[in-house]
Amino acid sequence: MKKQFQPRIKLLITFLPISLLVLIIGFFLVYSIYDQSIVTKIPQKKIEVDKNEKIKFLVFGDSGSGSSEQKKLASLMVKENPKIVLHTGDLAYDRGTPKEIKEKVLDVYKDLFSKAAFYPTLGNHDYLTDNGQPFVDTFDLPDNERYYSFSFASVLFVALDSNSPLNEVPNKMLPWLEKVLSQKLSQNKWVIVYFHHAPYSSGVVHGQDQKVIDKIIPILEKHKVDFVFNGHEHNYQRTCEIYKNRCDKNGIVYIVTGGGGRSLYPVGVAKWFTKVQKSVYHFLTVEAEDCRILIKAVDLTGSVFDKVTKDKC
């Protein structure tokens, strides 16, 4: 009898450790990829505003490093009492994992998010974990959540994903953008578009993004968008009003706001479109009313170092 069962016992002993090994390896792979965190959708802050009401919102990007500069800016932003906060991408370094999102976004901006609705867009670092899925799983955003639009008061906001959607064939995001601007433009006084990769930049690290210039900018110019906010370059830059690759008073102003807390990049030699550039930690405050908009760039001391207005009165 012992001889008859010996091979089965050996097989069982051999099989069990392999199964356990596979389970253990699989567990630790998932555990390490998602950085020991459980992804939870954060409910969006509900904000009610009248169509003609003056609103205040903030804009910043390239922030989630956990640095002292990031935390200082966070405390300054809370004091601004905004209704809305926009983010131009790279929320959580280095790879946009759930753990990084929790520790470098949700924990840092807890007080800010208790006051304002938060509308971020995806940066290249946010894509490094499962093509940005933790971002999608965490933030409660409109439409498909990778690119979306929403309106507050007299402003139409359009968030784009300047990462993989630009490479799709056939492309889904660009026809969607065309449709949104065609349908909603007449219902809003101001149009703000924001995404990560800067089309116009004098930065020495990334510079201009030609793919964005070729694919996105013609649609924005066609529909006479007012302002475009970007990140990617870790500094501050503001352009002249640009139309058809030249300065034109009827064009679009592009602002790089990538000084949200990650280590700064130097600015490069000013280009034909450069109005202001500075390597500085900062955020933007924007006040929009029916026929006037005011944008201020605020540094770590709370001082305004640049501002721009547009008047449609």
Image: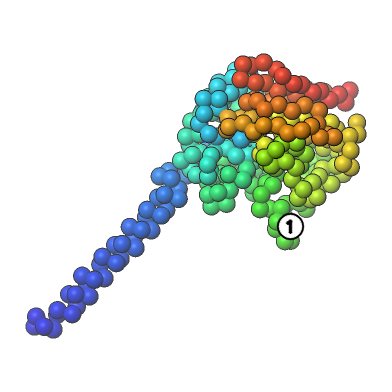
Q: Position of residue 270 (x, y in %)?
A: 79, 32
> Residue drawn 75% across and 36% down?
202
Residue 312 is drawn in which quadrant? top right
Residue type for callout 1: Asn
288 or 229: which is nearer to us?
229
Residue at the limit of the structure toward the front, as seen here: 269
Residue 76 appears in the picture as rendered? yes
> Residue drawn 67% across and 31% down?
266
Count of numbered labels shown in the rendering? 1
> Residue drawn 38% across and 58% down?
26
52 horizontally vs 104: left or right? right
Question: In the picture shown, does residue 2 fall above or below 210?
Answer: below
- Pointer 1: what residue? 171
State which quarter of the image contains the C terminus: top right
Q: Position of residue 89 (x, y in %)?
A: 63, 39
Residue 179 appears in the picture as rendered? no
156 horizontally vs 23: left or right? right
Question: In the picture shown, does residue 60 fall above or below 95?
Answer: above
Q: Secondary structure at mark 1?
A: loop
> Residue drawn 74% across and 21% down?
306
216 or 54: which is nearer to us?
216
Residue at the limit of the structure toward the left, as seen here: 1
Q: Position of residue 112 (x, y in %)?
A: 56, 25
